[in-house]
Amino acid sequence: MSPDRVKKKRERGSSLRAQAPPRVANRIFYVVAEGAVTEYDYLTMVQNEFSVPCSFRIDMPKARPDDMKPCKVAEHVLTVADEDARRSRGERYAEIWALFDRDQHRDVGQALDALSGHPKIRVAFSSPSFDFWLYLHYGMYDVPQSGCNDHVHRLLAQRPAFAGFGGKDKRITRSRAEDLLPRVGKAYANARNLGMRCASGACAHPGGAEPGCDLLDQDPSSGMWRLLDSLGVSARFARDEPTASGRRRTRPGR
């Protein structure tokens, strides 16, 4: 096998490689996730694709323990926030983000309470898991999963790029990134739509009879769309908007 074919084969089965972030970025974010692979691979994809045009940089922890529990994620971001507050104003993070899942964790509510009201910390919560956010790149789905990922993985497996995903294979490889990237706007719209249903009381979740459905009741859901908003990525998605004259105006996209 030629060296080029060996290289391509390795890339198909390896996590996405990080490109050099922009030397100068208007905003710097810190993001920590409970998983050790999928979330960070996805963030690498987002940074590789959007950091230069959107002028941001995402810092991530160098040590990434596998399967951190939500309370450990909360501890980590609180420590980072304390360290950040001691920096000079021009060196501080724009925002500090915690990514964690519902799964079968019992400490999600405790973690959310620990981070609630912090001026710098934001949470992107996914239920049943971050993998549901991946599926939203391909379609909408609003059947509660009660913290179980089995059905989400079956839905993802219908995509050729995600054949075998789950279990020991949780990487975002180059081929998977190439399949996801053209659909980031769709994932954003789907996740935001689910979130807006809860905000308006139009969802079917147990606590959704009144506007402001409790976060733990939002099953399925993903708050990753809010992170894309903060990064400025969502502003790059092409949308047709009516003008006062009735004509359609297309917002700049990728």
Image (spheres, grey):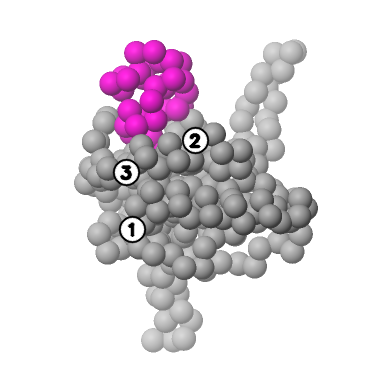
Q: Secondary structure at mark 2?
A: loop
Q: Quadrant of residue 214?
A: top left
Cα–Cα gap, marks 2 and 3 = 14 Å
Q: For residue 168, what is the image quadrant?
A: bottom left
Residue at numbered disc 2: 116
Residue 252 placement (x, y as % from top left)? 69, 38
Residue at (37% x, 48% y) in the render: 70
Q: Amino acid at mark 3?
A: Asp
What's the residue type where badge 2 is placed?
Ser
Q: Is residue 44 above or below residue 123?
A: below
Q: Is residue 43 visible?
A: yes
Q: Earlier in the sequence, mark 2 or mark 1?
A: 1
Is 209 within the magenta? yes
Earlier sequence position, callout 1 versus callout 3: 1
Q: Which residue is mark 3?
A: 107
Residue at 43% from the left image edge and 15% from the top image edge = 211
* Residue bearing mark 1: 67
Which residue is rendered at x = 26% and y = 31% of the image? Answer: 144
Residue 198 covered by magenta stretch? yes
